[in-house]
């Protein structure tokens, strides 16, 4: 019912740009350009957590981009999922163009806590990832979104935690579903073994990198122990936005 109300209200209530407040548009041209007007870029937090896979981001997490992500995530502006998905698709497309990127792009969203999903009425990362997969398929790239990860235990709210605290909070918190583990070990959607596809872990935002590092650990553990999860099976990551410092560090 909450999904239905959010969809209905977005049609009936007065619309303003989520990025700048300009009336009569959910996302104005200028704010859309801030979100996906530039090519996806590699980003890296400092310090970089052990096991973090290489990450592409669409835009720095600031100004209009920050406002748009928060509107979708916390205020139920579900119509923004398409624009956010296009930004994420650009990051996945960047990986598809790299060596070894041919084949199926499997977008695996980082799961939200069940309590957060219930409170918000939706899972924002899963919704954005589904939109990104649709966008990639429209371009002729084979892509699927599959929610293969789940929380193994409860974690504390990450807000206000530093990098070391976040790593401790998330350590061992994620695991693959039973079906997800079988899928990654034995083949991707019946289209051949893992080496013929690319697992791309996706999230809406990169700050310390702890969440993606934990997700990569869970994927690597399921696919086979003894190797770095950041490289096992071609695992990579993509996010809509990253902290501005992650872009600055990457330029140095």
Image (tube, rainbow, N blue to C red):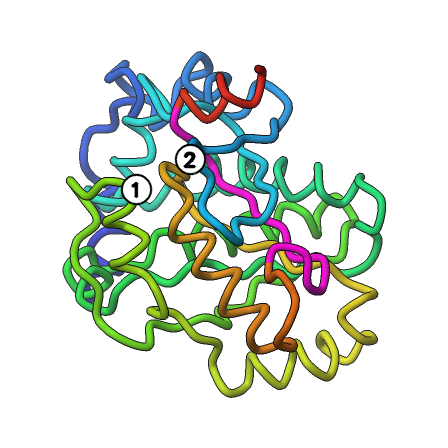
**Residue position marked by numbered label 2 in the rendering:** 47
Asked which secondary structure carries label 2, the reply is loop
Residue at point 49% right, 41% down?
239
- Residue 11 showing in the rendered view: no
The answer to if 233 sits in the magenta stretch is yes
- Which quadrant of the structure image shows residue 116? bottom left
The region drawn magenta spans 230-243
Residue at point 75% right, 57% down?
142
Residue 106 is situated, as x and y percent measured from the top left of the image, at 65, 61
As drawn, 194 above or below 169 = below
Image position of 189 (left or right of 88): right
Q: Quadrant of the C terminus?
A: top right
* Disc on res. 40: none
* Label pair 1/2, CB-CB below 8 angstroms: yes
**Residue position marked by numbered label 1 in the rendering:** 163
- Which residue occupies the foreground of this view, 131 or 239? 239
Q: Local crowd at mark 1 within 10 Å, few (<14), some, or many (≥20)? A: some
Image position of 65 (left or right of 83): left
* Precedes in sequence: disc 1 or disc 2: 2
């Amino acid at each position: 019912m909450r999904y239905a109300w959010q969809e209905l209200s977005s049609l009936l209530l007065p619309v303003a740009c989520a990025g700048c407040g300009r009336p009569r548009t959910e996302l104005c041209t200028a704010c859309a350009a801030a979100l996906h007007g530039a090519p996806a870029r590699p980003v890296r937090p400092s310090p970089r957590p052990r096991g973090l896979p290489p990450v592409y981001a669409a835009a720095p997490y600031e100004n209009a981009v920050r406002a748009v992500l928060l509107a979708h995530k916390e205020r139920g502006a579900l119509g923004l999922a398409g624009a956010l998905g296009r930004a994420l698709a650009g990051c996945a497309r960047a990986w598809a163009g790299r060596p070894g990127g041919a084949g199926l792009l499997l977008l695996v969203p980082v799961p939200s806590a069940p309590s957060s999903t219930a409170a918000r009425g939706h899972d924002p990362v899963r919704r954005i990832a589904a939109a990104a997969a649709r966008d990639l398929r429209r371009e002729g790239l084979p892509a699927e979104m599959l929610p293969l990860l789940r929380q193994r235990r409860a974690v504390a709210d990450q807000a206000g935690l530093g990098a070391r605290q976040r790593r401790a909070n998330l350590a061992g918190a994620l695991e693959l579903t039973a079906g997800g583990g079988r899928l990654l070990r034995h083949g991707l959607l019946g289209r051949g073994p893992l080496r013929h596809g690319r697992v791309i872990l996706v999230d809406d935002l990169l700050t310390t990198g702890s969440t993606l590092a934990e997700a990569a650990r869970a994927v690597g553990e399921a696919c086979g122990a003894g190797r770095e999860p950041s490289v096992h099976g071609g695992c990579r990551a993509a996010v809509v936005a990253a902290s501005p410092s992650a872009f600055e560090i990457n330029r140095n």
